Image (tube, rainbow, N blue to C red):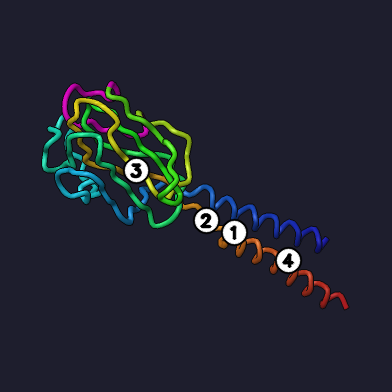
Amino acid sequence: MQKSLSARAVLLTAMLATSTLSTAHAAQIPVLSVTGTGTYNNNVSLLTNGAIPAEGTGWTNNTNVYWNGLTPTFTFQFNSVYSVDDMLIQVDNNDSYRIDYSLNGSDWSSLYTIAASSGNIGWGMDTFNQTEINFTPVNAKYLRVYATGGDNSYAISEVQAFGTPVPEPTTLTLLGTGVLFGQVFRKRRGSATCD
């Protein structure tokens, strides 16, 4: 009876720990740094300041980072790896943009493409969120945004990613070791009382 109760306790503890790790609510992911390459106007800090201009705001507004040409790229680094499951981005409405993700900042994969025909306004800055941007959650430490086509006049005002932290392998190892140690300790304690 004691062995089966102990085994159930270990199993229940492991299940609760695992469910706690995997069911955290997606929150906005903190951005450690934002960098830009190429020539653009205004400071890249505008891209993560939380200010979302009204839809239809002009693309050269002082709330936006704006540029001409396809050269500029903006990279967002998180403080650790996250399971990214949602985004909010505001861009100039009649252009195409691509969002890529990476674990190491060197090897990139496509997350989502915003087509020039996407969106729901006729002119100016357009906000895209979970309603318009659908993708399978990915593990990422970096996001990259850049224009891929349009009228050669581009702008971004805000980029927000949402998700949950991905536990480091050492966290899971420590959790497993703790459960195992608890089982061994219970077993020894049970043996000592039986003598």
The numbered mark at residue 183 is 4
Whether 192 is drawn above or below 127: the answer is below
The numbered mark at residue 167 is 2
Type of amino acid under label 4: Gln
Residue marked by disc 3: 144
Whether 26 is drawn above or below 119: the answer is below
In terms of depth relative to the viewer, which is nearer, 38 or 155?
38
Quarter holding residue 11: bottom right
Mark 1 or mark 3, earlier in chain: 3
Disc 1/disc 3 C-alpha distance (Å): 29 Å
Q: Nearer the viewer, mark 1 or mark 3?
A: 3
- Horizontally, is 7 left or right of 62 in the view? right
Residues under numbered marks 1 and 2 in contact, where contact means CB atoms less than 8 Å apart: yes
Mark 3 or mark 4, earlier in chain: 3
Q: Which residues are magenta?
A: 117-131
> At 47% from the left edge and 41% from the top edge, which residue is drawn?
138
Mark 3 falls on what kind of element? strand
Q: Nearer the viewer, mark 4 or mark 1?
A: 1
Disc 4/disc 2 C-alpha distance (Å): 23 Å
Type of amino acid under label 2: Pro
Disc 3/disc 2 C-alpha distance (Å): 23 Å
Mark 2 falls on what kind of element? loop
Type of amino acid under label 1: Leu
Residue marked by disc 1: 172
Q: Is residue 114 magenta?
A: no
- The overriding secondary structure of the stretch rendered in magenta is loop
Residue 184 in the image: state x and y as whole percent. 75, 69
Mark 4 falls on what kind of element? helix
